[in-house]
Amino acid sequence: MKFFVPVVHEEGQLFWNLVQSQLFIRYRFTTQRRIEALLWEGDDEDERSIFIGGNLPGGAEEDPVMVIHESEFFPGVMMFVCTLRMFLEREPPVALALTEHVEVVEFEP
């Protein structure tokens, strides 16, 4: 699987698991889906798109999105997005409700 997490590189799976466990202890259960991007109307150039390694729209510069987890209770509808700053400052990931305009892109197997 071409699973990539910025900064940690080859330890991407470990980082993904760590964030998932932090969500779990906050009663935010997630699926095992590995998500690379949330593209607004399928356009990665659109400023509303979210992708691993890019900045969160409306967020700070130089604060890359590290992982995107899918809610187990609302699959395809709710995602949890964690940036590097959130992780370092021990803040919970942001919960995002998706609209019909967002395309979910998974990492290639």
Image (cartoon, rainbow, N blue to C red):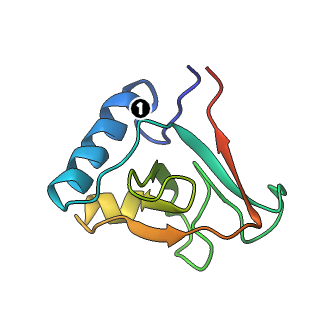
Residue at 49% x, 37% y is 33
Q: Which residue lies furthest to the left in this view?
A: 25
Q: In which quarter of the image is residue 21?
A: top left
Q: Quick one: quadrant of the C terminus?
A: top right
Residue 8 vs residue 79, the one in the foreground: 79
106 on left or right of 43 = left
Circle 1 packing at 10 Å, graded few (<14), some (14-19), many (20+), is some
Residue at 15% x, 55% y is 25
Disc 1, SS: helix
Residue at 46% x, 30% y is 9
39 on left or right of 84 = right
Q: Quick one: quadrant of the N terminus?
A: top right
Residue 31 vs residue 54, the one in the foreground: 31
The correct choice, above or below, for 41 with respect to 2 in the image is below
State how many labels appear.
1
Q: Kindly identify the amino acid type of the residue bearing the numbered disc 1.
A: Gly
Residue 109 vs residue 86, the one in the foreground: 109
Residue 44 rendering spot, x and y as whole percentages: 80, 55
50 on left or right of 34 = right
The correct choice, above or below, for 21 with respect to 38 in the image is above
Q: Residue furthest bottom?
A: 58
Residue at 71% x, 63% y is 49
Residue 53 rendering spot, x and y as whole percentages: 58, 49
Residue 90 rendering spot, x and y as whole percentages: 22, 64
Please give the residue where the numbered disc 1 appears in the rendered image. 12
Q: Quadrant of residue 10?
A: top left
Residue 102 rendering spot, x and y as whole percentages: 72, 62
